[in-house]
């Protein structure tokens, strides 16, 4: 593999980490959806580049799914849902932006510290790819934890899942990647449909203690 | 013969799901559901005698036949219980005929997913099957469409998805560790090859992988601190689903964890997976034991009891060794049978009383003596009193723990006692006391519950030789 090849792979995977940070601090719903679409495009590019490098044509299917389903269909569908439910103004965050960003940086540091020594035996290329993927996964978690709105939680989950697909495509010759990405797409489709059908606006948690008791079955 | 049984085990529920989705009449659908589950049980029983040749995708061995048989049995008796339960739900209009069509199709799809997860020899396929099982149960938990049910389903959905996402990352890491030695492609995902050659894998990758797998599949097992979905899902869904969740799905997730534990344990340079499992198991036991005291919803009460028992089982397998693993297997079987029996009873109780609040339910032994006393027996059994099988397995576990690490055993016994007294405390209010109510319930509807409790009691008094030999063999494999 020439240095240029791995540089391009790093550029694409690294831009996913960067876009994950962008997702963390968006406070407008439409902007969040747009950034997520770019996240999916970066994933599609990254997977397609892996498909080319590994001479693995089936990975192009995964790239295509990422491009069309997650880059176009889901953001468009979510945009319509956001308009219908009337939640496009702002996003409620549980923790404010500053600490969230600092925590996100710590998470990226953590994943590098954890991944790089562990994957000594692998080539340098797989190592960095995995470290990037773990960062995207952890940032996705962080986003799910810090958001209250069901739509932005789903976006957090999808960005997390993009990290997993990145890891799976980077693992040389891993079978079932296409099947797994299809499986995830079904999962996400269910989430989006259920948000729409049941008009789930907020994650159901609140700081109101009485409501908490209710949901634990203790106020009965 | 074995191949035929394996095909039947997977195709019966898969085709059944399609068929049931097309049948609008609920009586016919319920009867068909029972028949399909009986067929699946037959196939599972045939697999006990005749094992097909392992392939790259499917594998039947001693370990998964235990889970398959327990699963198929609980699936079958739950389908019988469900037939009576949903008739009542239809009368009270909590469910519509269209919902039931969906419900039955999902029930069979769940059976298919669980059987597939159990017989898969491919760690990727196993992951896909467990994801499918999660999806079908999410749909069924939310079937009442009330706010509480939707909230429970959403919580389960999000936490379950995060759990399986973590498990997938762990699976990818295991593949990476394997492909160095087994080459790229399907071979490096076949469980039997992985377990056979894991000694030469990179230990640090396996270490990291197991942490992800433990947290990921542990979410589905309902281990503390990733258990939050479990009580809600049990309380808000239809009761047959609570029975299937506790009796089956938790086991399947635990089975996935055991498969990976066997891979990891084959490598001498890896951090032992046992202590991690012991810690999570013990935490779950203690946490759930204390939580049992403040429950005011009868289904939530027994959901926390499930967390407690999954903790005990994880502890047993984490401890390892022939005796503790034997106790773990026995406890898993006994818990599945007892807990599903309790949920059968609880389902009827909440229908007859019209509430799930424990404070409003009193004197069941007067209002419906047979149901009341069966519930008493069930709770006595799950609390770990002799002569029931749960006592046997807990006794075995406690003695083997005492022999190896007395301090751990003291914590374990404390946890068991805490849970025991909480359950007895609640049982008094539920089963005894004065009440003017009298409920009618056809005796046949209690047949599944009676059958399960009879099996548990029989196992507590006498375990047949072949079963002991079989469990002992599996326990020696589990190490």
Image: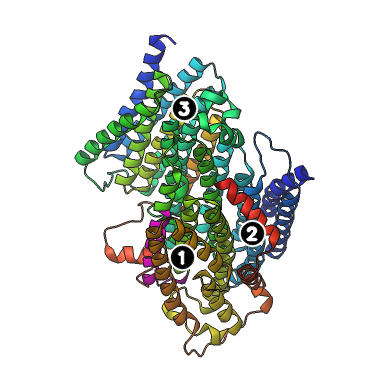
Q: Distance between the residues labelled 2 and 3?
A: 41 Å
Circle 2 or circle 1, nearest the eye? 1
Q: Nearer the viewer, residue B60 or B299?
A: B60
From the viewer's perspective, is B70 left or right of B414? right
Crowd around label 3: few <14 · some 14–19 · many ≥20 (10 Å):
many
Per the image, label 3 sits on a secondary structure element best described as helix
The residue that mark 3 highlights is: A67
The residue depicted at 51 percent of the width and 70 percent of the height is B384
- Residue at numbered disc 2: B75
Please report the bounds of the magenta region as a residue range.
Answer: B280-298
- Can the viewer see residue B158? no
In reply to whether residue B297 is colored magenta, the answer given is yes
The image position of residue B36, as x and y in percent, is: 72, 56
Dominant secondary-structure state across the stretch colored magenta: helix
**Which numbered disc, 2 or 3, marks the residue closer to the eye?**
2
Kindly identify the residue that appears in the image at 60 percent across and 57 percent down.
Answer: B103
Residues at marks 3 and 1, CA–CA distance in whole angstroms:
45 Å
Tell me the subunit letter for badge 1: B
Tell me the tag on residue B305.
1
Front-lying residue, B187 or A47: B187
Image coords of residue A16 (percent x, y) = 36, 27
The stretch drawn in magenta includes residue B107: no
- Name the residue at 45% across, 77% down: B424
Q: What element carries label 1?
A: helix
Instruction: Assign a secondary structure to mark 2.
Output: helix
Left or right: B383, with B83 as reference point: left
For the residues labelled 2 and 1, the Cα–Cα distance comes to 20 Å
| Chain containing the residue with disc 3 | A
């Amino acid at each position: 593999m020439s240095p240029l090849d791995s540089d391009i792979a790093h550029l694409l995977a690294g831009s996913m980490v960067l876009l994950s940070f962008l997702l963390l601090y968006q406070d407008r719903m439409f902007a969040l959806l747009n950034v997520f679409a770019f996240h999916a495009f970066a994933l599609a590019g990254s997977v397609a580049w892996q498909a080319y490098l590994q001479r693995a044509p089936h990975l192009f299917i995964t790239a295509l799914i990422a491009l069309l389903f997650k880059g176009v269909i889901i953001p468009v569908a979510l945009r319509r849902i956001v308009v219908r439910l009337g939640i496009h103004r702002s996003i409620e965050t549980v923790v404010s932006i500053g600490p969230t960003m600092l925590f996100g940086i710590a998470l990226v540091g953590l994943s590098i510290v954890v991944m790089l020594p562990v994957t000594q035996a692998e080539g340098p290329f797989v190592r960095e790819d995995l470290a990037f993927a773990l960062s995207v996964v952890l940032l996705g978690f962080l986003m799910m934890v810090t958001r209250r709105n069901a739509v932005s939680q789903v976006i957090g989950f999808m960005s997390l899942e993009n990290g997993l697909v990145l890891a799976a495509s980077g693992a040389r010759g891993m079978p079932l990647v296409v099947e797994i990405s299809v499986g995830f797409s079904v999962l996400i489709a269910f989430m989006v449909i259920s948000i729409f059908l049941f008009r789930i606006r907020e994650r159901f948690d609140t700081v109101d203690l009485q409501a908490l008791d209710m949901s634990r079955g203790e106020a009965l | 013969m074995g191949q035929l049984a394996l095909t039947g085990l997977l195709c019966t529920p898969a085709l059944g799901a399609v068929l049931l989705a097309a049948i609008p009449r609920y009586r016919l659908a319920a009867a068909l559901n029972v028949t399909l589950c009986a067929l699946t049980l037959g196939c599972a029983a045939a697999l006990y005698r005749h094992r097909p040749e392992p392939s790259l995708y499917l594998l039947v061995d001693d370990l998964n036949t235990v889970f398959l048989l327990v699963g198929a049995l609980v699936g079958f008796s739950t389908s019988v219980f469900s037939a009576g339960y949903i008739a009542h739900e239809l009368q009270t209009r909590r469910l519509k005929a269209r919902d039931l069509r969906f419900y039955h199709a999902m029930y069979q799809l769940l059976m298919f997913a669980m059987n597939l997860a159990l017989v898969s020899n491919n760690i990727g396929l196993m992951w896909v099957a467990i994801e499918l099982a999660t999806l079908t149960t999410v749909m069924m938990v939310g079937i009442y469409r009330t706010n509480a049910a939707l909230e429970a389903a959403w919580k389960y959905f999000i936490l379950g998805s995060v759990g399986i996402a973590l498990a997938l990352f762990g699976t990818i890491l295991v593949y990476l560790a394997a492909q160095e030695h087994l080459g790229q492609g399907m071979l490096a995902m076949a469980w039997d090859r992985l377990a056979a050659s894991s000694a030469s894998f990179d230990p640090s990758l396996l270490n990291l992988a197991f942490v992800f797998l433990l947290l990921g599949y542990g979410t589905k097992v309902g281990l503390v601190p990733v258990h939050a979905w479990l009580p809600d899902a049990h309380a808000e869904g239809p009761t047959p689903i609570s029975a299937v969740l506790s009796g089956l799905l938790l086991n399947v997730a635990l089975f996935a964890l055991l498969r990976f534990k066997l891979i990891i344990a084959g490598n001498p340079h890896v951090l032992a997976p046992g202590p991690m499992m012991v810690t999570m198991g013990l935490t779950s036991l203690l946490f759930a034991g204390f939580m049992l005291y403040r429950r005011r919803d009868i289904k939530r009460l027994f959901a926390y009891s499930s967390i407690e028992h999954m903790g005990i089982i994880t502890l047993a397998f984490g401890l390892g060794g022939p005796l503790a693993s034997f106790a773990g297997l026995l406890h898993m079987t006994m818990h599945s049978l007892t807990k599903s029996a309790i949920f059968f009873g609880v389902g009827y109780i909440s229908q007859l009383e019209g509430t799930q609040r424990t404070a409003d339910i009193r004197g069941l032994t007067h209002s419906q003596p047979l149901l009341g006393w069966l519930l008493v027996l069930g709770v006595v059994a799950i609390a770990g009193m002799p002569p029931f099988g749960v006592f046997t397995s807990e006794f075995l576990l406690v003695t083997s723990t005492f022999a190896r690490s007395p301090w751990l055993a003291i914590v374990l016994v404390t946890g068991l006692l805490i849970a025991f007294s909480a359950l007895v405390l609640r049982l008094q209010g539920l089963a005894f006391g004065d009440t003017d109510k009298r409920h009618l319930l056809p005796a046949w509807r209690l047949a599944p519950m009676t059958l399960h409790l009879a099996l548990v009691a029989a196992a507590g008094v006498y375990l047949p030789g072949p079963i002991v030999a079989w469990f002992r063999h599996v326990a020696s494999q589990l190490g």
